[in-house]
Image (cartoon, rainbow, N blue to C red):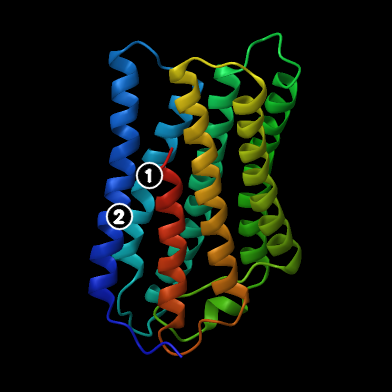
Amino acid sequence: MIPAQPYLPWKVSITILHVVAASSSVLRFEYRRRTHRLWWDDYAAILSAVIECCPIALIWLRIRRFDDSEHSRHLKIAFTHMSSASFGSIIWWSRISLALALIRITPVWSKVRPWIIGFTCGFILNWIALVLGMGITCAVNTAWQHVKADILICRPSYGVVLGSLSTNLIGDILLAGFSLYRLWYIKLRPAQRRLVLLVFSTSVLTLIASVGVGIISYGRVAEGPGALLVWVMAINIEVSNTICVI
């Protein structure tokens, strides 16, 4: 049983985490730019960092006390849609960045390169499907929009939930698996080895975070008046984790 939580400490802590995460991607991009080593994986990473500004703003706009007016209800609905779209975009563009990093260091002649390009394209298609699926589900099923609470949550359909959880697991396993293949079977320069180790460790951390959020969301381990806030903050931690480690 989770007791009611004060908003301010959570908001300050998670904001700092988001800022640190976004700053790490910006510093990486600037370093690559100065050393003339920018490639598509860097642009995907910086896109995730730019979208990261949305959760930072939403923490302060969404996590607060609202009155019962119709204007406030519409604001809460809009914030929920924006949160869903930004969270999904950040997580999947982080994975796309990692997949592009694998393409970057995989020789053109390698037999695994077409496979990596293939699941990178799959990541992009899955991001589109996830954002559209969440948006359409929340627009069609409007019961959540009339709940009397400061934070509104749109529970996606069973199909969207199953698809999201399975693609999260498959995506991270693919990244980790191909990273291990690169380490074991292909000779790499020290800089390339470090990049592959980064992709592998990032994929494992993201996988752990996804499993943790899944348990909190659907395992009935978080109950009580403060459970909703803790769940929202757990998702924010997962999102900032994916940015911080790419």
> In the figure, residue 234 lies in which quadrant?
bottom left
- Residue at figure coordinates x 57%, y 52% from the top left: 207
Query: Is 64 left or right of 109, judged from the image as shown?
Result: left
Query: Is 8 left or right of 202, judged from the image as shown?
Result: left
> Crowding near pointer 2: few (<14 within 10 Å), some, many (20+)?
some
Query: Is 226 left or right of 140, judged from the image as shown?
Result: left
Q: Position of residue 93 (x, y in %)?
A: 53, 39
* Contact? badges 1 and 2 (CB < 8 Å): yes
The disc label shown at residue 17, or none: 2
The numbered mark, 1 or 2, whose residue comes first in the sequence reads 2
> Crowding near pointer 1: few (<14 within 10 Å), some, many (20+)?
some
> In the figure, residue 211 lies in which quadrant?
bottom right
Q: Position of residue 22 (x, y in %)?
A: 33, 42
Depth order, front residue of 6/105: 105
Report, in whole angstroms, how far the alpha carbon at label 1 lies from the one at label 2: 9 Å
The disc label shown at residue 244, or none: 1
- Residue at figure coordinates x 42%, y 87% from the top left: 2
Q: Position of residue 45 (x, y in %)?
A: 44, 33
> In the figure, residue 135 lies in which quadrant?
bottom right
Judging from the image, what secondary structure is the residue with disc 1 in? helix
Q: Where 11 falls versus 3 (above or below)?
A: above
Judging from the image, what secondary structure is the residue with disc 2 in? helix
Q: What amino acid is labelled 1 in the image?
A: Cys
Q: Where 119 falls versus 76 (above or below)?
A: above
Q: What amino acid is labelled 2 in the image?
A: Leu
Q: Where 164 falls versus 155 (above or below)?
A: above
